Image: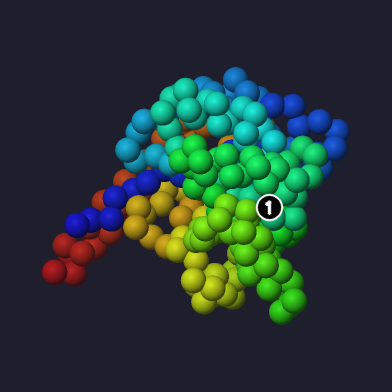
Amino acid sequence: MPDSRRLNVCFHGIGDAGPAIPAADAAYWVPRSTFLAILDDIGGRPDAAVSFDDGCASDIEIALPALRERGLTASFFVLAGRLDVPGSLSSADVRRLVAEGMTVGTHGMDHVPWRHLDEAARHRELVAARARIAEVVGGPVDDAALPLGRYDRVALSQLRRAGYRRVYTSDRRLARERAWLQPRFSVRSDDTAESFRETVADARRISARLTATARGLVKRVR
């Protein structure tokens, strides 16, 4: 069977970021109205999946109720080092997400890129953080999302050796449904429902052109 394309959409914080949120993180906080509009656009589509990074308190305060109202599920990638910190998810919040049918994965410990890590940092980010989240949810943590979307071949190799089932990026392109590495479209603070819809449409057009080109090359080779 052909490996169909998948639209992975990633949110971070929802609502007002507030002065305590670093500017780099605030660039990925979106208004509640934008979040709901995009969720309504993609909700229920069999080729779309929703995820949330950073473990912000808005995951439980805004995202979870909106998902429940629409009968949707999502993946939440939690920062182990921010658990139980004001403004972030508590351990009880994470357990509630699981109880509501959501998937919980790891986003590492300290929200640092996973490139160029020394042995101690690699263990902290890929092993200790995963173990901490698994302890909270009471089960295995099989999926990971790359902090800040940054990675290289070494980081991916380390994640494969660690046995992660799937790894999610922020490459803003369509994913192959069965692929181990899953690109996502991260929604940014300057996105609107309309601009995001056009971004996805552009990606679909590019994907279709590349697929058509590849098929044409195969036919010529034959």
Would you identify the image quadrant in which residue 221 lies? bottom left
- Of the pair 85 and 26, the residue shown nearer to us: 85
- In percent of width and height, residue 71 lies at 41, 28
Residue linked to disc 1: 79
Colouring chosen for the image of the structure: rainbow
Residue 112: x and y in percent read 73, 59
Q: Amino acid at mark 1?
A: Leu
Q: Is residue 181 above or below residue 97?
A: below
Point 61% across, 27% down: residue: 62
Q: Is residue 49 above or below residue 33?
A: below
What residue is rendered at 51% in x and 41% in y? 99
Q: Secondary structure at mark 1?
A: loop
* Residue 67 as seen in the image, left or right of residue 28: left
Of residues 44 and 204, the one nearer the viewer is 44
Residue sitting farthest toward the right: 19
Residue visible at 49% across and 37% down in the picture:
100
Q: Is residue 126 left or right of residue 141?
A: right
Q: Is residue 131 left or right of residue 193?
A: right
- Toward the viewer: 210 or 104? 104
- State whether residue 117 is above or below residue 193: below
Q: Quadrant of the N terminus?
A: bottom left
Q: Can residue 102 be seen from the camera position used here?
A: yes
Residue 37 percent location from the top left of the image: 51, 22
